[in-house]
Amino acid sequence: MARTKKTLGEAVSKEIQSNFNLDAFKTKKGLKSNIKFKDQEWIPLSQAFQDVTSIPGIPMGHIVLLRGHSDTGKTTALLEAAVSAQKRNILPVFIITEMKWSWDHAKMMGMDIKEVIDEDTGEVVNFEGNFIYIDRETINSIEDVAGFILDLVDEQKKGNLPYDLLFLWDSIGSVPCEMSIKSNKNNNEWNAGAMSTQFGNSVNQKITLSRKESSPYTNTLVCINKVWTLKAESPMGKPKLMNKGGYAMWFDSTFVVTFGNVMSAGTSKIKAIKDGKQVEFAKRVNVQIDKNHINGVTTRGKLVMTPHGFINDSDRELKDYKDARKEDWAKILGGGDFRVVEEDQAYTDISSFGEEPQ
């Protein structure tokens, strides 16, 4: 009897469905909008980065994290993205809250930057070009960063900023939230909560929605994420690399690149030396694709980081780079008869903590 009822119910349901117009229902409820996403495009990074990672560069329309300890290649990757964006008429938007920025380094990497010269003194008084730059002079909190990004996206929507935008934030973990500022206490839980509210629930959604075909522009957010090392939970356990500012950005990101190691920067220095003077012209660094929801490729390898960008870790490319720069180094060292040395892997120990340091 139960089987007969079930069969009858199925028959009734099938009859109702056969007379039901799903397209009409979608139209009535406003569910017929374009749901197609754009074909995936990339902002290319250097050929060396592509060779080592098997990844073209920065995926457009996504949240991207570049994380690692200090001086491991994060800024190099960020600047390579900015240079590549300029060449493709994508507007780089620098949000510099860590204040380690160098215009000389940006120009050395290939950024198209115009110096503004004071006619009376001949001094450089400003820099202009196809980019937007903002720093701690006006941005002092997590809320400020989010508000600035949302304002530019709004101006873009109004037609006042007709570019695809590449937001480049250096760095997560370098500014507190408003509550921490007002209380004069840098509270990690408050900061993480602000990142979740301001970015996880707002900015990040605006960025990823630009991937839809209905959006006339495609916006991308690349963030350098400061890190810290969590102590092993047991004698047999291993320390873990943790992100400053909580994990809202990790969860929302679709692409994460880690530079260096967990307990050390994981770099080895390459130097030109003469008579006690030395020029550090490159570092060998580990790089790993930790998260990739674009095409699933996760890789690890080694790159050589130079002031001009990444090169492959090969004798030929190192020699070519040395030959191209040897005259500059000779001027600094006082002659061309210098020697090139490479330090052993620099395992400078980095302190580990039981909880995120303030």
Image: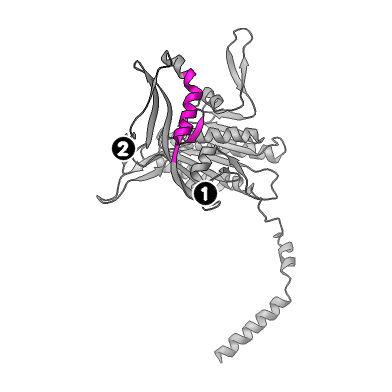
Q: Position of residue 149 (x, y in %)?
A: 59, 38
Q: Residue at x 50, y 26 (%)?
A: 101
Q: Position of residue 20 (x, y in %)?
A: 72, 73
Residue nearest the observer in this picture, 118 or 58: 58
Q: Position of residue 354 (x, y in %)?
A: 31, 44
Q: Which residue is mark 2?
A: 351
Q: Residue at x 58, y 37 (%)?
A: 167
- Is mark 2 in CB contact (under 8 Å) with mark 1? no
* Relative to 112, 345 lies left or right: left
Q: Which residue is mark 1?
A: 252
In this rendering, does residue 263 appear at all?
yes
- As helix, strand or loop, the secondary structure at mark 2 comes to loop
- Neighbour class for label 1 at 10 Å: few (<14), some, many (≥20)? some
- Neighbour class for label 2 at 10 Å: few (<14), some, many (≥20)? few
Q: Is residue 26 above or below residue 80?
A: below
Q: Amino acid at mark 1?
A: Asp
Residue nearest the observer in this picture, 185 or 195: 195
Q: Position of residue 216 (x, y in %)?
A: 70, 44
Q: Quadrant of residue 282?
A: top left
Mark positioned earlier in the residue sequence (2 or 1): 1
Q: Quadrant of the N terminus?
A: bottom right
* Relative to 16, 285 lies left or right: left
* Relative to 9, 183 lies left or right: left
Q: Amino acid at mark 2?
A: Ser
Task: Identify the residue at the far bottom of this view.
Answer: 1
- As helix, strand or loop, the secondary structure at mark 1 comes to helix
In this rendering, does residue 144 appear at all?
no
Which residue range is magenta in the image?
302-328
Q: CA distance from mark 2 to mark 1?
A: 28 Å
Q: Quadrant of the C terminus?
A: top left
In the image, residue 212 lies in the stretch drawn in magenta: no
